Image (cartoon, rainbow, N blue to C red):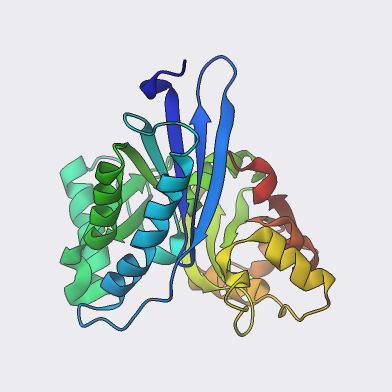
Amino acid sequence: MSLPWSKVVRLRVTPHVASGNLVRRGLRPRVLARTGQAAGAPAAAKAGAVAAQAAALAPAIDAVFAELAKTAPLRGARLEVEWADALMVFDVANGDFAGNSDAQLQSVAAACMTELLGDAAPAHEIRWQLQRDGKHLLIGAIAHEYLHLLSEAAGRHGLHLSSIEPDFCLQWNRHAAAVKRDTSVFAVVSGHDAVIACVDKGAVAAISSGAWVNGSLPRGEASDDASKLARAVADGRPVKEPLLDIRLTRLLASVGLDPAAASDCVLVAPGWARNKVSSRWTVLNRDATAA
């Protein structure tokens, strides 16, 4: 018999899809069930784009939990959430932060997000991580609306919300060892979007979020469903040339670095992306390493 606290639900949320695994932890961890659910298109909402996106995601998340519960009861299980970078805001502050208190660093992070988000900043939870060099503060902001969405969904299904981790941070923690040189680039692809980071001696020194392909992928293919994307390539349907190299050049130039100096470029992406990027990128297949 599997005790409730030995079960974990791992939920991945992108703007278009919610997917989840039910995992039994122990000496021999085992995936008990997997499922995914497409989200509806966000409807126009007077409350704004975040409210509309949350309303579109809520039924998909509930459907994932309901499907997993058919295999084993979820009540009491831990919920670990991988949150899409496209639903986050990132920034990096540069300075001499080594002697700063947590309160001082929080103030720096809040000031940076106020500059980026303006009047919308108070509607976000702002989190930060001081890089090991003490000179770069990695900052992320997630809308309170999304936090409420996850908390309420967990409560409805008897889950304990344990963690919410942005995709970029999760992949960086998994794959940072693949970055070998002092000046490097680390990028994470999810659907149409990518987060690209300039890495200086192991610290995230600058960051950029946005599209990595020209134009738009078809809606179903923008959902991170690797099998659909692979079929599109196999069928000969066009997947546009990536913008990664252009964005890489702009990011490095913004911090005064020569793009040619970044010979170590690591990309975490679905396996099909290997043939869609230039030879400078070392591609790590995110689908092969996802738990």
- Above-or-below relation of 44 to 177: below
Q: Residue at x 50, y 58 (%)?
A: 37
Residue 137 position within the rendered picture, expressed as x and y whole percent measured from the top left: 35, 52
Residue 21 position within the rendered picture, expressed as x and y whole percent measured from the top left: 52, 41
Res 261 quadrant in image:
bottom right
Residue 123 position within the rendered picture, expressed as x and y whole percent measured from the top left: 18, 65
Res 116 quadrant in image:
bottom left
Asked whether the viewer can see residue 91, the reply is: no
- Above-or-below relation of 265 to 39: above
Residue 223 position within the rendered picture, expressed as x and y whole percent measured from the top left: 56, 66
Q: Residue at x 44, y 27 (%)?
A: 7
- Left or right: residue 251 versus residue 127 is right
Give the mark count: 0
Q: Residue at x 21, y 83 (%)?
A: 46
- Left or right: residue 59 versus residue 226 is left
Query: Which one is in front, 15 or 20?
Result: 20
Query: Which one is in front, 111 or 274?
Result: 274
For the C terminus, the image quarter is top right
Asked whether the viewer can see residue 196, the reply is: yes
Res 228 quadrant in image:
bottom right
- Above-or-below relation of 182 to 230: above
Q: Residue at x 53, y 70 (%)?
A: 251
Query: Which one is in front, 234 or 273?
Result: 234
Looking at this rendering, what residue extends furthest in the front direction? 70
